[in-house]
Image (cartoon, rainbow, N blue to C red):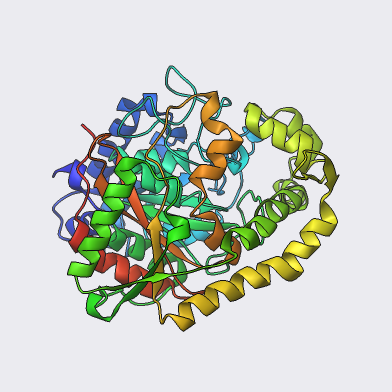
Amino acid sequence: MDFDQLTLSQAVADLRAGKVTSTALTTEALNRAKARAELNAFVTLDEAGALKAAAAFDATGDRTKPLGGVPIVIKDNIEVAGLPCSAGTPALKDYVPKADAPVVAKLRAAGAVIIGKTSMHELAFGISGYNTAFKTGAEFGVRNAYDRTLIAGGSSSGTGAALGARIVAGGLGTDTGGSVRVPAALNGCAALRPTVGRYPQEGIAPISHTRDTAGPMAATMTDVALLDRVIAGGDTIAPADLKQVRIGIAKAMLINLDADTEAAFEAAVTQMKAGGIVVVEIEMPQLAEFNGQVSFPVALYEAYFDLVAYLKHTGTGLTIEALAEEISSADVKGTYDGLVIPRKLPTPDGTLVDAKPIYDAAIKTARPALQALYAKTFANNRLDAVAFPTTPRVAIASNPESSSLENFGLFIQNTDPGSNAGIPGVQIPIALGATSKLPVGLELDGPAGSDRRLLAIGVALESVFGRLPPPR
C-alpha cells in the first residue's frame, strides 16, 4: 500500500475487502507521526489507545461502518474522552474531558480510530500556528508539511500538517475566520467550513458562537464529503455536472497575491472553464466595509463570554483571568490582555473604546447587511459559488513575526467574509507554485445551506485538478 497516496475512501475500501488491517494502518500512522516530530503537529499522540481501538476493530469490528478502522486526528480544542484538551494553552494542559464532543462521537460511532490531538495556534487566535506553549521538534511553531521552515497556517495547524505530511488522510479542525481552510490550503489538502449550525458546537473550546464551527479536513474532497456525511447525515455525494455550474469571481478577492498564487489561480479558472463551468465576473461592493464592521467586533467581544461559559463546563475551576495569565504566545497574550478581558476594541487612531455598542451594531446591522449582500450576489448572478484563492500567498517563514497583525489580516482576507456571513466554503488544492513548489488552494463559497452542492462541485473538480504530489 502506498501510504503517500492513501485516502480515507481507499482505506475504508481496503479494510472492508480484508486487504489491510486497522492495526497495520494505525501503526503506520503512529510511526509516521513520530518520524515527523519536527513538524510539531501533535500535542498528544495516543499510541496505546489507538492500537487498542484498532485491535478491537480487527477482532470484532463492523466492516460496514463508514470509517471502520481508519486512523484520524482531532484538533486539540475539540474534546476527546480520556485525552487532554488544551486548546493550545498551558492553563488547560491537564484538562481531560470525560466525554467526546458530539462531532467526535459521530466519527467514533462510524468506526474511526483517533490517533491523537493536533497542535494549534494558541486558543485558536491566529493563522500562523506559531505557538510557544507546546513543541515536539527543536523549534516552536507547527511546521509546514512541504517545508518545515515555514508556517502550517492556523489555527488548525497540526491537522493541516498531519494531512499534508501524509500521516493520516482525515481529521477535524475548527474555523472562525479561516482556520480549517488556511492550513488546508498551505499544506495541500481539502476542507469544508460548513454553514454555521450544520455541526454541533458543544464540547469545543470557543472563540465566537456566531462565527465558530468545526470542519472536516482530509486528503481529498471525496474524503471531506465522507466526513461531512458521517457528521451531518445524508447520502453519498455524487460529483456535480460541471456544465450545470456557475461560478462568480470578484476582483476585490484577487488583491495582494504573490506570483505563484496568481498564476495557479488563473490556470485553475482556465481548467474550470474547459471542464464546462460558466465563470462570470461579479462585483461585491461594500464587502470589505461590511466585513470589517463584523469581524473583530464579534470575535473579540464574544470570546470573553463564550470562553467563560466553556471554562465553567470544564469543571476545572479556572477563571478566564487565570487562563490569560498563563497564555504563552505573545500575539495571543496581547489580544487577551488588551482587548478580550477588558472587552475593548481599538479605534482607527488606536484608542480603546467599549466593545459592547460596536458589537451590538455588528450583530443587528452589519452582519445582516453582509448576509444580504451575499444572498443578492448569488441570486442575481444565478451562482452556485464565488471562487477565489484561499490564501493570497503561499506559506511564509515560521517565527514570531509570522503572527503579526498584518499577516493575520492578509491570510484571512478572502476566508473571513464568508465566515462572518455564516456561509459554507470548500478549500480545494489546485497546484504547487511554479517557483516555490508550495501548495496553492482555491476556495468556493456558496449560499447558506448549500454545503452538499459545494461538496459535489468540489468532488467533480478533483478530477480536473488532480491530487498534489506528496512532500519530498
User: Which quadrant is home to the N terminus?
Assistant: top left
Q: In percent of the image, x 62 and y 40: which residue is there?
A: 123
Q: In percent of the image, x 84 and y 58: which residue is there?
A: 357
In the picture provided, is 440 more to the left or to the right than 406? left
In the picture provided, is 169 more to the left or to the right than 106? left
- To which quarter of the image does residue 150 belong? top left
Q: Nearer the viewer, residue 427 or 113?
A: 427
Q: Nearer the viewer, residue 140 or 283?
A: 283
Image coordinates for residue 397, horizontal then vertical, percent: 42, 27
- To which quarter of the image does residue 406 belong? top right
In the picture provided, is 176 more to the left or to the right than 415? right
Image coordinates for residue 466, horizontal then vertical, percent: 19, 55
Residue 324 shows in the view: yes
In the picture provided, is 146 more to the left or to the right than 389? left
Image coordinates for residue 325, horizontal then vertical, percent: 76, 29
- The residue furthest top is 138
Q: In the rendered view, tell whether residue 462 sits above or below residue 148.
A: below
Residue 189 shows in the view: no
Q: How many marks?
A: 0
Q: In percent of the image, x 77 and y 58: which residue is there?
A: 359
Q: In the rendered view, tell whether residue 467 sits above or below residue 201.
A: above
Q: In percent of the image, x 37 and y 33: which residue is there?
A: 144
User: Which quadrant is home to the C terminus?
Assistant: top left
Q: Nearer the viewer, residue 34 or 219?
A: 219
Image coordinates for residue 88, horizontal then vertical, percent: 58, 36
